[in-house]
Amino acid sequence: MSIIVVGNILQDVYLNLDARTENFETDKTGTKWLDLSFNASEHHFFSRASSLGGAAVSLEVLQKLGLSATISGSQLNFTGTTNTPNDSASAHRYIMVADGQVTYFAPSDFTKTTFTPLPEAPDYLYIDRSAEITINTAADILNFLDKHPNTKLVIYARNFDNAHLNILIPRADLLFSELSDAPELQTFDHHKLIKVSETRLSYLNITEHITAHRVDILTHLSLYSIASATILGCFILGKTVEDSLKLAKLNIENAKLNSVLSLSELNELMTNTHTSKSNPELIAKNLVLYPKGILAADESGGSIHKKFAQLNIPDTYDNRRDYRNLFFTTPHLSNYVNGVILFDETARQAADNGQKFVDYLTAHRIIPGIKVDQGLEHFNPDTNHPEETYTKGLDGLENRLKEYYQMGIRFAKWRAAFTVQLDSDNRIVTPSDFAVNKNCQILAEYAKECQAANIVPIVEPELVYDGNYDINTAANLTGRILDCLFLHLDRQKVNLKACILKVNMVLAGKQYPTQSTPEEVGMKTAEVLKTHIPSELAGIVFLSGGQTPEQATANLTEIIKHGPFNWPITFSFARALQDPALYAWAGNNTNIAQAQKAFTDRLQANTSALKNNP
């Protein structure tokens, strides 16, 4: 099948501005205005990159799908050597991004599009989104179609302002449109109409939701072109509508600057996506693969504010992004972790290369996850336990999980916290049976919701380390909580093979006069696990829970020595992995290399601890 693309080759210049510098001026109303001096010596960029846009994007997609495609009047080629230099572009567009917002600067007058037919009539003539059709070009195309009735006409109409393009629309065999209620569409056959937006692709009653937050590399300009060309190419290849929309979604969400996916890469992603969706047990198994752990980078806004305050780091959007970015972009991170737990804000942010963190991690063979609980709430004062807490967040969870799945997230985490209080006779006051039962019931309901959304749940009942109690009390309480949790998981019919437990190590509370030795922690923790946890569980990951980085690693080492266990066991630390890097970084991006070195040292120490498994 041969295709002629009619459109303009554009030169896109991507400028990812650092919004914290003098690129912006703030007026008396607090509004930020971009300084448009365009002086590279005065502007700070996270990145600056160029790419061929417009019809070149469509051409690249079609050629990488294995189709014979050319741009009318051009020799541009993405399957081999590019014979057309970049200065053949009809215009430069500047795409400027700051704080996740994108602004376009483009000429008001683009080069008018011409149509040069090939000696042999193509099977398809595709008028690209970038085309600036004149009355003469429209006449040339109509004349060509009259002479070659077997050539199918495909049109991308970004709007219906061009009367010359509108003349061609009744002849279209397939039409892409960003508008759904334009008068021009009222009489058009909707069986030939594909609707494209920044968030979804639709054909009749079939819809595929897309997520593209990488605005400094994949803006809606390129998103529209990738979507339409992928769908067109898949139709030509004989794919179903459903598969064509899914493959377009995958191409959008995994494309890089000057690099969309090949047909084989798309097919592989499609297979993996289908396998993952139909087999969450596989995801759970991959999350606890030996000898790697799970990075917990899911601190809430309040938690990260406290972290930053300790080092006088301003708690800004950019600083939070930079902090997460230094962990996720650490060289060879996939050698040490199978997954990363994100906070909602983080899941919507992007790495320095413009790729959203979810996509960046996935591309590096790391499974992205998400914290979905919404923090602790005290029980009703009318109850007998007003000082105790439950974890909220079940309201609206189903819809949030659907969105997260569409974003590419494949597992979730929910924490329930149990604070230990003893009376003067060392009898347990809290956690009460009521609080344990209520929180375990909520954990089980959350896990059931996750599995219904094809997301692997991590259930985290944490006996809080910050207390005054001995190791035997910790063992008894942890066992009691685990018994209650697995009772409720069973009642909710949660598939334990697709479920992971995140649990505290068994050790005396931080305020207890005699602290537990690693040997004691290893023995007691192993004893509790082997006594209270069903063998079919997918795996167990430990939280560090306020231990020092060295303490958490030493205790993990001793726990592993008491294997073999019925389940894979690994770590899912936050502070015990991050704190040394936080202090090395201290809010200054010139310290990123030192911070990543400190982070890597902790990762290596903990993966080494796992290797002590007998």
Image (tube, rainbow, N blue to C red):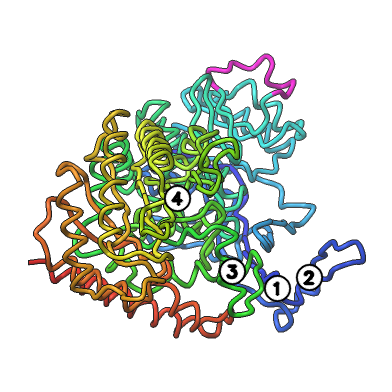
Dot 3: within a 10 Å radius of its alpha carbon, few (fewer than 14), some, or many (20 or more) residues? few
In this image, 555 relative to 195: left or right?
A: left
In the image, residue 119 lies at what x, y percent?
A: 47, 40
Q: Judge depth for marks 1 and 2 and give the one in front.
A: 1
- What is the distance, in whole Å, between disc 2 and disc 3 at their CAs? 28 Å
**Disc 4 secondary structure class:** strand
Mark 4 belongs to which amino acid? Ile
Residue 24 disc label: 2
State the image coordinates of residue 213 (x, y, percent, origin top left): 56, 52
Discs 2, 4 touching: Cβ within 8 Å: no
> Of the residues shown, which amino acid type is indicated by label 2?
Phe
Magenta segment includes 186: yes
Residue hosting label 1: 20
Q: Which mark is residue 306?
A: 3
**Does dot 2 land on a helix, a strand or a loop?**
strand
Q: CA distance from mark 3 to mark 1?
A: 21 Å
The residues bearing labels 3 and 4 have C-alpha atoms spaced at a distance of 21 Å
The answer for how far apart the CA atoms under marks 1 and 2 are is 8 Å
Residue type at the position of mark 1? Arg
The CA distance from mark 1 to mark 4 is 28 Å
| Magenta stretch in the rendered image | 181-192
Q: Earlier in the sequence, mark 3 or mark 1?
A: 1
Where's residue 40, x and y in %? 70, 79
Q: Residue at x 42, y 37 (%)?
A: 438
For this rendering, which residue is in front, 117 or 112?
112
Gap between marks 2 and 4 measured at Cα? 33 Å
Residue 119 visible at all:
no
- The residue that mark 4 highlights is 370
Query: Label 1 crowding class (10 Å Cα cut-off): few <14, some 14-19, many 20+?
Result: few
